[in-house]
């Protein structure tokens, strides 16, 4: 984590290239140049180009541009952007795309949540157990490896990106999308310690690009990339509590400002807001559970005092060691899996079951508390902070961190949700210290865990604020401090020697069975 995560780096590089276009930077050009909707390779209109050149004296000199404030030029690039017909059409298309993307996301997460309940609750009850036995993760994760191995070696898209590199790389196209959906739906409910956020973003971008296929010849590459980003934002907003966190995530990752920020922000906000509205309404109508990242109940509100801040900084540094260390150790796992992808994927998936079974044996609790993405367990920690002893919390952190480390380098899914739980559980294990209260510990743990894995302190702080609900106002200063310190400390840790596999390694792994 010495460098920004994969999607962060790509959005920063790609975002600048995407919006350094004539539609945004118009301050230096005249009103007679082509609008945003004109293709970039269109020929300029005939006429004089330089009145001082004798070859161009065949016609009248061009009229000077109107002064700022007139109808021809407001002097404001944002206003010109909003008046551009091409950009207006793009905003309208984002509204239309938000509806089907939200519906697809709803059924995606509902199906995944239903399968998770069948595997970890209904099936153990059907065979005579009141809960999943300690050995349950071993065959479940072995099956997940058997399912995933042919996907990552045979199908286009290889089931998506390896989660150790963040939320993903370039947008997933329609051809690669089936492998991502199958890998997520078939393996995440079996106990893989990853979240659904990365597959959801791939689902949103893939559907947006699929909708653009009939318009591919007329649309510019920049417009297509913008719609793919808006589709990803609409999909991820369905499980992050609404469009605000998703839009902040995209903007902070892209590191844009001024007109460039507006050009990206509006499509993402419109698509995600439309999607969130449809997602919420459809969920209430069907009554299906989606298992999004939320806290139905939080500990009693306590105003943070000096003790919370004094303990908070060392605890955040401990979270950096746990979450950041597990992330760094996942990189050698990824390189090892690329040596012979099929059987090593099965081996890694089987190895994930070992710490999950160990957690159940040591604590005499259900192994699903350490398995899966951690959304359910996070809600249980918030509702009953003292339900788990300090020893059980420490065991949870160690076992889940080991399982998460292996999953990051070998399986498919999102890295954020388990990191949030690891941060919260680490802080809650320390909440018995004199002067440290459970509510501030929960808030700073979630913010620090998210900041370490994403490298986005603002997004992490906003996410923790929304999760804390009514308690957020009092905890906000501590949340911000935890996000900033976690981000800075993780960036200052020594970077791994090789942060990403090279293109030749990727190509070789893709060609090997």
Image (tube, rainbow, N blue to C red):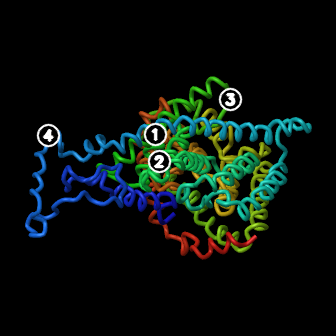
Q: Quadrant of the C terminus?
A: bottom right
Find out whether the residues at labels 2 and 4 contact each other: C-beta distance under 8 Å: no
Residue 146 lies in quadrant: bottom right
| Element at label 2 | helix
Which dot marks residue 70?
4
Q: Nearer the viewer, mark 2 or mark 1?
A: 1
In the image, is 275 to the left or to the right of 59? right
Q: Earlier in the sequence, mark 3 or mark 4?
A: 4
How much space separates mark 3 and mark 4, taking CA atoms?
54 Å
Between the residue at mark 2 and the residue at mark 1, the CA separation in whole angstroms equals: 8 Å
Nearer the observer: mark 2 or 4; the answer is: 4
* Residue at x 74%, y 51% (from the top left corner): 187
- What is the C-alpha distance between the residues marked 2 and 4? 32 Å
Q: CA distance from mark 3 to mark 1?
A: 28 Å
Residues 32 and 170: in front is 32
Which residue is rendered at x = 68% and y = 43% of the image? Answer: 389
Q: Position of residue 189 (x, y in %)?
A: 73, 45
Q: Is residue 466 above or below residue 47?
A: above
- Which residue occupies the foreground of this view, 24 or 162? 24
Label 2: few (<14), some or many (≥20) within 10 Å?
Answer: many
Snapshot quadrant of residue 341 = bottom right
| Dot label at residue 227 | 2
Give whichever of 195, 435 is nearer the camera.
195
| Res. 288 mark | 3
Q: Tell me the CA gap for discs 4 and 1.
A: 30 Å
Compared to 386, does 486 lie above or below?
A: below
- Asked whether disc 2 touches disc 1, contact meaning CB atoms under 8 Å apart, the reply is yes
Residues 281 and 27: in front is 27
- Per the image, the residue denoted by label 1 is 93
């Amino acid at each position: 984590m010495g460098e920004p995560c994969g999607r962060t780096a790509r959005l920063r590089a790609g975002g600048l290239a995407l919006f350094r276009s004539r539609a945004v930077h118009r301050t230096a050009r005249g009103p007679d140049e082509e609008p945003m909707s004109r293709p970039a390779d269109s020929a300029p209109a005939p006429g004089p180009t330089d009145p001082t050149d004798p070859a161009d004296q065949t016609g009248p000199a061009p009229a000077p541009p109107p002064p700022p404030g007139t109808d021809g030029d407001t002097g404001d690039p944002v206003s010109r952007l909003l008046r551009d017909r091409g950009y207006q059409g793009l905003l309208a298309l984002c509204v239309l795309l938000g509806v089907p993307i939200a519906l697809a996301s709803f059924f995606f997460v509902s199906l995944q949540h239903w399968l998770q309940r069948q595997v970890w609750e209904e099936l153990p009850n059907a065979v005579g157990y009141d809960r999943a036995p300690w050995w349950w993760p071993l065959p479940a994760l072995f099956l997940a490896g058997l399912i995933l191995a042919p996907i990552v070696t045979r199908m286009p898209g290889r089931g998506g990106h390896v989660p150790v590199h963040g939320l993903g790389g370039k947008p997933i196209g329609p051809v690669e999308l089936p492998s991502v959906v199958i890998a997520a739906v078939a393996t995440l409910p079996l106990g893989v310690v990853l979240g659904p956020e990365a597959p959801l973003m791939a689902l949103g971008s893939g559907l947006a690009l699929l909708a653009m296929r009939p318009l591919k010849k007329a649309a510019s590459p920049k417009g297509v990339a913008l719609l793919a980003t808006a589709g990803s934002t609409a999909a991820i907003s369905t499980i992050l509590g609404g469009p605000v966190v998703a839009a902040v995530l995209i903007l902070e990752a892209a590191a844009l400002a001024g007109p460039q920020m507006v050009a990206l922000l509006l499509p993402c906000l419109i698509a995600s807001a439309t999607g969130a509205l449809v997602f919420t309404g459809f969920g209430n109508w069907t009554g299906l559970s989606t298992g999004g990242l939320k806290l139905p109940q939080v500990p009693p509100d306590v105003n943070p005092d000096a003790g919370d801040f004094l303990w908070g900084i060392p605890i955040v540094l401990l979270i950096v060691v746990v979450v950041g260390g597990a992330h760094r150790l996942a990189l050698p796992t990824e390189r090892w899996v690329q040596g012979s992808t099929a059987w090593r994927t099965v081996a890694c998936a089987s190895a994930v079951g070992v710490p999950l079974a160990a957690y159940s044996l040591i604590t005499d609790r259900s192994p699903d508390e350490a398995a899966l993405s951690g959304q359910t367990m996070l809600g249980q920690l918030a509702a009953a902070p003292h339900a788990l002893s300090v020893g059980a919390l420490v065991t949870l952190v160690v076992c889940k961190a080991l399982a998460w480390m292996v999953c990051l380098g070998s399986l498919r899914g999102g890295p954020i949700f388990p990191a949030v739980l690891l941060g919260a559980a680490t802080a809650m294990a320390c909440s018995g210290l004199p002067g440290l209260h459970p509510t501030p510990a929960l808030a700073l743990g979630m913010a620090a865990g998210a900041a370490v894995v994403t490298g986005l302190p603002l997004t992490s702080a906003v996410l923790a604020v929304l999760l804390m609900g009514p308690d957020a106002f009092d905890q906000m200063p501590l949340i911000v401090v935890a996000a900033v310190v976690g981000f800075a400390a993780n960036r200052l840790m020594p970077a791994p020697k090789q942060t990403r596999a090279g293109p030749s390694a990727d190509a070789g792994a893709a060609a090997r069975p």
